[in-house]
Amino acid sequence: MGSMATGGSGTATVPRRQRYMDRKSLVPLLLFLPPTLVLFTLFVVLPMVDAATFSFFDWNGYGPITDFVGLKNYDDVITHRNFGTAVRNSLIVVAVSLLVQLPLAMWCAIALAERSVNINILRTLFFLPFMLAEVAAGLIWKFVYDGNYGLLPVVGDAIGVKMPFVLGDKLWVIPAIMLVITWKYFGFHMMIYIAGLQSIPSEVIEAARLDGVRRWQIVRHIKIPMIRSAIVISVFFAITGALQLFDLIIPLSNGGPSHSSHTIVTFLYQFGILRMKLGFGGAVSVLLFVACVIVALAYRRILFKVEQN
């Protein structure tokens, strides 16, 4: 009887401890969640609702919002002669990020994953462009590309080659911007991969080497599969960042020449904000938001299927 009573009281204390821990975990939740929700509502939800509202009106930002036009702004955006160019350029940025930037980051990460003073210096040098503000990076590369006084024509004159005005040429402006984007962001993805590679147990690599597995086979069959979560995060950042690219384009080319280097966001800024067509700009922002949501949901669905397999 005594043992049964002891067992009963012991089992009764477990739910009490659980309830105590649950109450204890509610304290930081109730303390920090309301301010976060307020800030998220003020600076994310309400601007999104305002943009969606503006997209159904012909409004220049002044006076009451009364001129309801329905879906006319969306029709104007889709049929705009420069919107297709902006979408194409954004997709080019996505492609370059996935096919050039991320493989380059992976190659550098594999080469620099070891811990040493010299390697740490190289990592820092590769990561420095990402730490530089986008506007500053754009202005620096604008000087480099300047056809009269920039570094590019100086190098061209030194080797006897006439360099084009790349930022003023429709053929060269997009490749020039892609070079800057790759230079600016590959260090960020490299550091993500390095963190993943350093988390791999050294015993696994040593065992593979003792079994006679070649270096490239270790990379392909051991290292890359074991940092899959880091690759997933990196790819998601690359896609969403490419769709939202703005503050590197404006100081570099400002969407020129002849609006040939616009991305979706710079198109919104140029033809919506600067021209005081907030309804038009709201329609662009809604379309961009829908595109980002579709990408996120599709990416999550594909990832879920891969994890199941």
Image (cartoon, grey):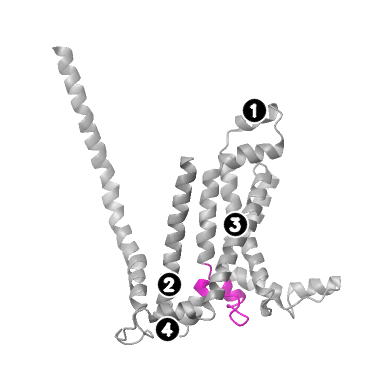
Position of 193 with respect to 55 (left or right) is right
**Whole-number angstrom distance, CA of label 1 to CA of label 4:** 64 Å
Q: Can you tell which of label 3 and label 1 is closer to the viewer?
A: 3
Q: Residue at x 75, y 72 (%)?
A: 152
**Closer to the N terminus: mark 2 or mark 1?**
1
**Whole-number angstrom distance, CA of label 3 to CA of label 4:** 34 Å
**Magenta highlight: main SS:** loop
Circle 3: residue type: Leu
Circle 1: residue type: Ala
Q: Which residue is the site of mark 4?
A: 277
Magenta segment: does it hold 59? no
Q: Can you tell which of label 2 and label 1 is closer to the viewer?
A: 2
Mark 2: secondary structure: helix
Mark 3: secondary structure: helix
**Whole-number angstrom distance, CA of label 4 to CA of label 2:** 12 Å
**Whole-number angstrom distance, CA of label 3 to CA of label 1:** 32 Å
Q: Which mark is residue 98?
A: 3
**Closer to the N terminus: mark 4 or mark 2?**
4
Circle 4: residue type: Lys
**Closer to the N terminus: mark 3 or mark 1?**
3
Compared with 208, 261 (above or below) is below
> Magenta region: which residues?
245-266
Q: Residue at x 70, y 72 (%)?
A: 144
